[in-house]
Image: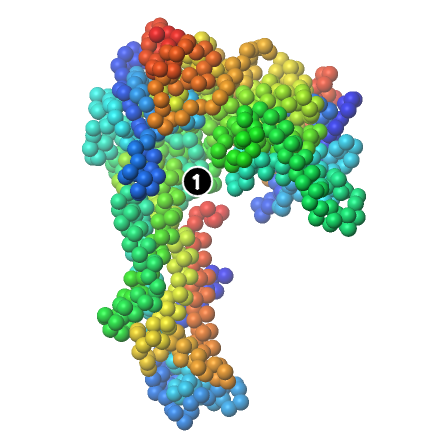
Amino acid sequence: MNDPRRSVIDKDMETSLVELKHLKTYFRIRRGLIRDLIEKKRFVHAVDDVSFDIRRGETFGLVGESGCGKTTLGRTLIRLVEPTTGEFFFDGHNVFDLGPEDLRNLRKEFQVIFQDPFASLNPRKTVYQIVAQPLRTHHIVDSGQMKEKVLDLLEKVGLQREHLDRYPHQFSGGQRQRIGIARALGTNPRFIIADEPLSALDVSIQAQILNLLEKLRDEFHLTYLFISHDLSAVSYFSDRVAVMYLGKFAELARAEVIFNSPAHPYSKALISAIPSIRSSTDRKRISLTGDVSTPIDPPPGCRFQNRCFAKKGSMCEESDPLWTEIERDHYVACHLFA
Amino acid sequence: MDGDSILVIEDLKTYFFTDRGVVKAVDGLSLHIERGESLGIVGESGSGKSVTFLSVLKLIQHPGRIVGGRILFQGEDLIQKSESEMMNLRGTKISMIFQDPLTALNPVLRIGDQISETVLFHQKRDLLKNAPLSRRVSASMDPLWRKTLKKRASDRTLEMLELVKIPSAAQRLHDYPHQFSGGMRQRVVIAIALSCEPSVLIADEPTTALDVTIQAQILELLTDIRQKLKMSLILITHNFGIVKELCDRIAVMYAGKIVESSKVKDLFDNPKHPYTRALMECIPEASKKKVHPIPGFVSSLIDLPTGCSFHPRCQHVMERCKIEGPSLRKADEGSYVRCHLFNES
Amino acid sequence: MALIGSIVVILWILVALFAFPLSPHDPLKGNLFKRLTPPSWMKGGDVRYLLGTDHLGRDILSRIIHGSRISILIGVTVVFITTSIGIFFGLVSAFYGGKIDAVISRVVDILLAFPYLVFAIGMMAVMGPGIFNLMLALIYKEWVTVCRVVRGEVLAIKKIEYIDAARAVGVKNAVIMFKEILPNVLSPVIVVSTLRVATIIIMEASLSFLGLGIQPPTPAWGSMVNEGRSFIFGFWWLSTFPGLAILTLVMGINLMGEGLRDTLDPRLKE
């Protein structure tokens, strides 16, 4: 995305708003009272040592297929899931260290847009109640001004006054997503995590929501973490993109680079798999064979090696590749680049 | 329109009679598909794409009903056929697969059984088609006969699993659906659908629930199978890219009607209908600087706009569009459009 | 439908409130000369005893009218209290999970495993008979049913995204439990609760029959049904009319409950 309007924000990009260091989120597999006491503990390595930073005003895209851990990563950041180890600095504050009161205060700064516009809104609450909830929780305005503030937020996302007293089931998917966005904006956050915001929507509605997110980004100088399995949408919307596989980052680079000249074999396969109307008729598609290996107590070595078409040799089976910077702002975890 | 049309739909109308009004899900749809051809049907939700083919298989239930038109399969009108005649057709001559492989498979049956169940059912029917009742009863009690049938069915099952490229097929016959990944499950579903060698396979969003790399594998598989079995494929999807890869022809649907249909290459080189063009503009791609959403909302199927259903959202709307609904007319060789911009008569 | 139910319930409540003026006779005093009189429209019936008399000569109609007070009191009170307790523990147990859930669930399982009557007998033996103790005994056992239903519902709802959304916003746990989850749980709870009123009334009957709980001569529908059992052949009205009373009240409550559930669900509003 080389939109000239965004160069204004480049200056801000020097400072990191979000810094993640060696995040690990493991889930313990429980098999019953007795077995848990006797047998060795087993863990699902949902997020396995991930470090990156997001700069102020940046849109950071996170892609991967199901089971890669991207959703868990997002949920760990907002502490809906507790991290196993690692540090998460938001504007200098170590979020994982905060006690409940401070955490609640900090939540004003980062908000979430969820995937399922049906399930992310309480069916028994009106639009007004849903959007007012964060305002009330954090005492953003007093009750006298509440209605006005809610109307203001609704207007920003393209909804109207008459929608206030209606219930979620009376709206279409796209409108529900807008309500979710209005809710997220209430506390004036600086950082928004969008977890698959487009997946449940029709193509033309996706475009509407994408445009809305863009408009809000410019208006409020928002920083986004955009999680999705839709590579095209992510590459279009993000500044930098990270590709995730089985709990680890495979590659991280600017959006155009990931899309046009990916380095990691998995990224290559992923990009080549997208059916695109712009592709030439003889584009070579890389077919991956085999199944994804297990995220439960994975063996040493590269996670991707059992399906990799560019395997270097025994090195791939023995040791985890290091996160290497192969050119400016372009990182890969692959033995081919060690 | 020459050649061997295996399926011809003429002016199909399927309406749903609900408390809130009549939902005109399919409103005058015509199309045809040749033997061995693959046709892509593209549309968003509410376009009527799924209802059209559920109508073909006469799987529409109350409060929906086919209210008009003809559906000619190999020359015979399916609308006139009885339910038992349709049961003979479904799964044998025309098969359909759906989006979610998880719910399409019975979780408590082994997949080998699920495939052979279909085979057995149809084999029995075929063999005993004209036999008198006494013969049928004696046959079902004859252990040798049953054994032969079973052997045939299990050979066929193995054949199908190998056709859909499931590794170690002989062992995996005895596994349950939950022991397979999403992509593998969809392969099993395809195996079941193809077990009786249908002439037409209808695939309703077969890869939407799958990861993109798995989707690529399934699309490759479908291409492969089509060539091997010389089967017609109808692929219903909202994704233009998939159609481009897999199909010979494409039809775009909006609000229960086809708005444009042509050969795939022609459509992508030169999309005609404003909806088709607007839809292509919407899709985000890394190389694009902006996406242009289609203004307005999808028309309610109960309360369709007058004239052309797309006119409230059309950039090129003219006065005529608000009054008169355009009909599907030939624009080029092999291309049809439903739009006043192209029907200057 | 719900309206009919509500009307029936209200009528019974009025009957219960105005029991004294409404009853033609004293429910406790029996005229032995008039024992086992059939209902007034039958042969041998007496217009003064509209629904006939029981084996002690007491007017069935008056006993039913007075019995309504007991049944409504016990049925409604017990259900109300057990629902509240059950909702509370169900919510807490499912929401917090872990050890709290384990402990509460074990308690629930143990209580459920007890054969109901054995438990009740034990309790009454310790506490002695009487209406208050009866209610206590009923409450001890009943709350677990509600608790289980609530727990199941909450576990399902907990996973839905709007709960995550509330947590992401920073809403406090207690607020989430009561303002987000509870309204969504009430629907099935109401249905279960209304069904249980009938069960409670019948349980009361069993206990009274065993000599615990309501002591004769106090009229209670359940007990009346039981007392009439020995006379069922030939003197059917002793059990039938109290039975009909139970039937109408319970149906009324059920219909009312359904109506209540429907009004509470915004999805059915259009």
From this viewpoint, is residue C67 visible?
no
Looking at the rendered structure, the kind of residue marked 1 is Pro
Q: Residue B220: x and y, percent?
A: 58, 20
Label 1 lies in what chain?
Answer: A
Q: Is residue B328 above or below residue B17?
A: above
Q: Nearer the viewer, residue B297 or A226?
A: A226
Q: Residue B214: x and y, percent?
A: 51, 23
- Quarter location, residue C35: bottom left
Q: Residue at x 47, y 41 (%)?
A: A170
From this viewpoint, is residue C26 visible?
yes
Q: Residue at x 38, y 48 (%)?
A: C152
Q: Residue at x 54, y 25 (%)?
A: B167
Q: Residue A148: x and y, percent?
A: 33, 36
What colouring method underlies this structural image? rainbow
Residue labelled with disc 1: A168
Q: Is residue A12 left or right of residue A157?
A: left
- Quarter location, residue B83: top right
